[in-house]
Image (cartoon, rainbow, N blue to C red):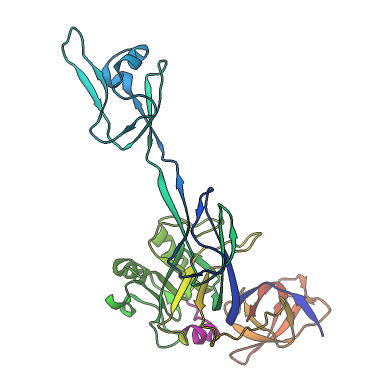
Amino acid sequence: MPQAYSPGLLVSPGRTVRRRRILPITGEVLVAPGDHVTARQVVARTSMPGDVEPVNLSRVLGIPPRDLPQRLMRQVGDAVHPGDVVAHSPGLFGLFPKDYLAEISGTIEAVSRVTGQLLLRREPRSVDVLAYLTGTIAEVIPNEGVVVETSAAVVQGIFGIGGEGCGSLRIVTPTSRDDLTADCLTEELAGCIAVGGRRITREAVDRARELGLIALVAGGIDDHDLREILGYDLGVAITGSEALGLTIIVTEGFGEIGMAERSFRLLKSFDGREASVNGATQIRAGVVRPEIVIPLTQREFTETELEEPVLRNGAAVRVIREPWFGELGQVTELPHEPRLLASGSLARVAGVKLQSGEMAVVPRANLELIQG
């Protein structure tokens, strides 16, 4: 049977999902292999050293740097808190004495007799790593983190921004062809993941942040709206670290594109269920896809076999270039010989029957496989 490799998105009602949960530096793992964990549970913890705050102590006290050691009321290594007297100068002949009072909590790290600088390191920050998924600890990596495993339904998106979150999945539009607007969002959705059909509007994003939603999921978003939401043009680097207070995931692309009916039906079947989302996206080497993961009970779970990422007759695909951008269809033919395109170039193509019933001849590079 003719076939060809093609990248694809996962849309599956049942998969075994494993996610690594790793600390930024070594620390303490709080769970053991086989433990059941919830998505919001802390599984590992560490402390990050605080930032260093320099103070020109010589200038503050009005004395030469070489005299600083004699004027310190606290020594290197001592802890200080706001209001503590760190150094004192009696002034000239006892006139105009000066004190330097600590403005932050931290530890005195160094005092220079050359530059007159005092270095004060802020208190360490506690860093917690959450399980992200409700499931089981499949592996513990000593002092570093864990691998969490769960049975889940999974829908991957094309693009996302914002980091991880978890909450109740709520369908807020009647069909996959309806826009996710501000009017779709109500106060009862605070802490939830709202799923719409077509375009996420900028007003919906503003409303979602105001209400405290965890995430918005829909088929598409306007690139101009995205620029206004972020306040800058998004580059090609990995996303996911944006400080929006909200995760946004689009399953199809940019513009007014309805969510694939298969994805919408799957998410709708889990309306009201707890889900985890991650907007992190990377389209270069080491592809990272944004995702919606809905943990399943043992009774619900039936694992679907993941097909190899190859095009073959009957495969479900999405067109990712004009003139059929965003259209879904099924491969009907994979001619072996290259075809001459309207642009004048030769390319390997596929015959695709679109959902509208139209037959299209599409370059294979313009197709994305829908896996599930």
Front-lying residue, 64 or 196: 64
* Image side of residue 141 versus residue 239, left or right: right
Q: Quadrant of residue 84?
A: top left
Picture layout, residue 211 above or below residue 93: below
Front-lying residue, 196 or 227: 196
Front-lying residue, 50 or 149: 149
Residue 86 shows in this picture? yes
* Image side of residue 146 versus residue 333, left or right: left
Residue extending furthest toward the right:
337
Residue 186 shows in this picture? no
Residue extending furthest toward the left:
95
Q: Is residue 258 magenta?
A: yes
Q: Residue at x 75, y 78 (%)?
A: 349
* Image side of residue 59 versus residue 112, left or right: left
Quadrant (top left, top right, bottom left, bottom right) of the C terminus:
bottom right
Front-lying residue, 319 or 129: 129
Position in image of residue 164 (x %, y %):
46, 64
Q: Quadrant of residue 20?
A: bottom right
Picture layout, residue 267 above or below residue 6: below
Which stretch is magenta? 256-267
Q: Quadrant of residue 319?
A: bottom right
